[in-house]
Image: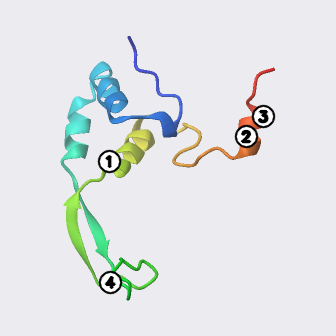
Amino acid sequence: MATEIKDFQSITIEDIIEWCKENNQVEWLKAEASKEVEQKIYPKGEDGKVDKKQAPIGTKIVPIPYTTLKTNFVAEFFPDLKGKGKKKDFRTKIKELEV
């Protein structure tokens, strides 16, 4: 059964894995999953929580987050996919209703 990729929001890691297996892209997936990215470090505010309104105080290297992997997957294999990372607004949902 072919894995169908319809919209950004519904894609799961299982969908990505199955699609890559079905389309001989496992090497791409392994390479992508092994990447590391730079993450900003923000200071903590008076309440002890991270305050992203302030300027970063440094960076650290971390394994690629799932959200970045998912975004890269869509950009690589489904560049025309609508709704990349954006939820549909109520007007779009209403327009798509079938009567």
Whether tag 1 and tag 4 are in contact, CB under 8 A, the answer is: no
Q: Earlier in the sequence, mark 1 or mark 4?
A: 4
Q: Residues within 10 Å of mark 4 (few under 14, many from 20)?
A: some
Residue drawn at x 25%, y 45% as measured from the top left: 32
Residue type of the residue flagged with mark 2:
Thr
* Left or right: 18 in relation to 96: left
Rendered residue at 73%/40% (across/down) = 92
Q: CA distance from mark 2 to mark 4?
A: 39 Å
Q: Which residue lies under the disc numbered 3?
A: 95
The Cα atoms of the two marked residues, 3 and 1, are separated by: 31 Å
User: Mark 4 or mark 2, which is nearer the start of the sequence?
Assistant: 4
* Numbered disc 4: secondary structure: loop
Query: What residue would you read off at disc 1?
Result: 66
**What is the number of the mark on residue 39?**
none
Dot 2 or dot 1: first in sequence order is: 1
Amino acid at pointer 3: Lys
